[in-house]
Image (cartoon, rainbow, N blue to C red):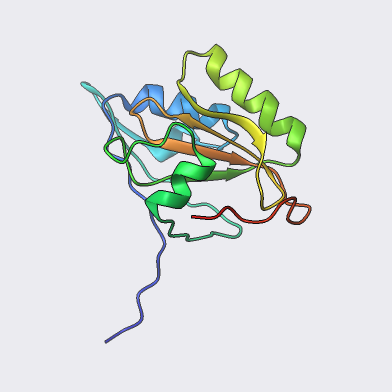
Amino acid sequence: MPEAVFDQINLVVRDVGRTVAFYRRLGLDIPETAIWSTPTGMHHVSLKTTGEFDFGVDSHKLAKVYNQGFVAERGNVVIGFRLPSREAVDATYAELLSHEHQGLQPPYDVFWGARYAIVEDPDGNPVGLMSPSDGPRTRPPEI
């Protein structure tokens, strides 16, 4: 069997324009040329990104530790964004809430040593905001 390369996450959304605005606020450079529109509105975005991509799998028990707003029925995917500092996590979280996006996990210092928060995008997809880690701060939780 050929080796598969994980290279895409595709979000199916109610309002492409609102979703584009949300991810642009997070710093994604989404040029107009990446958006396919018809007279009925925006329908598709195709954006190639660069840099490291991390694929993680977490248990529901662990998700409940780092995300106080975790509800399995809401969605089982967290779309992660790396921010340059702890202060940037706090500022980005506040900025997104000021645009009426729902906060699921206010910023806090997680046991693995990063500053972390979670907001919902316009369709309710959890979006993680994380600073670089400076090493474990506490022991992992007993789960």
Q: Position of residue 136 (x, y in %)?
A: 73, 55
Numbered label tally = 0
The answer to whether residue 40 is above or below residue 27 is above
Identify the residue at image location x=69%, y=24%.
91
Quadrant assignment for the N terminus: bottom left
The quarter holding residue 64 reads top left
Q: Residue at x 57, y 32 (%)?
A: 26
Could you say which is closer to the camera, residue 105 or residue 37?
105
Q: Is residue 111 above or below residue 73?
A: below
In the image, taking residue 123 as reference, residue 110 lies left or right, namely: right
Q: Quadrant of residue 34?
A: top left
Q: Please, is residue 48 above or below residue 131 in the view?
A: below
Image-based side of 97 in relation to 72, left or right: right
Question: Which residue is depicted at the point 38% across and 46% down?
Answer: 77
Q: Residue furthest front?
A: 142
Residue 98 pos. (x, y %): 56, 12
User: Where residue 76 sits in the image (x, y, percent)?
Assistant: 34, 46
Q: Nearer the viewer, residue 84 or 51?
A: 84
Q: Nearer the viewer, residue 50 or 68?
A: 68
Task: Name, please, the residue furthest toward the right.
Answer: 134
Residue 5 locus on image (x, y percent): 40, 71
Is residue 55 or residue 135 the one in the foreground?
A: 135
**Residue lying farthest to the left in this orientation:** 40
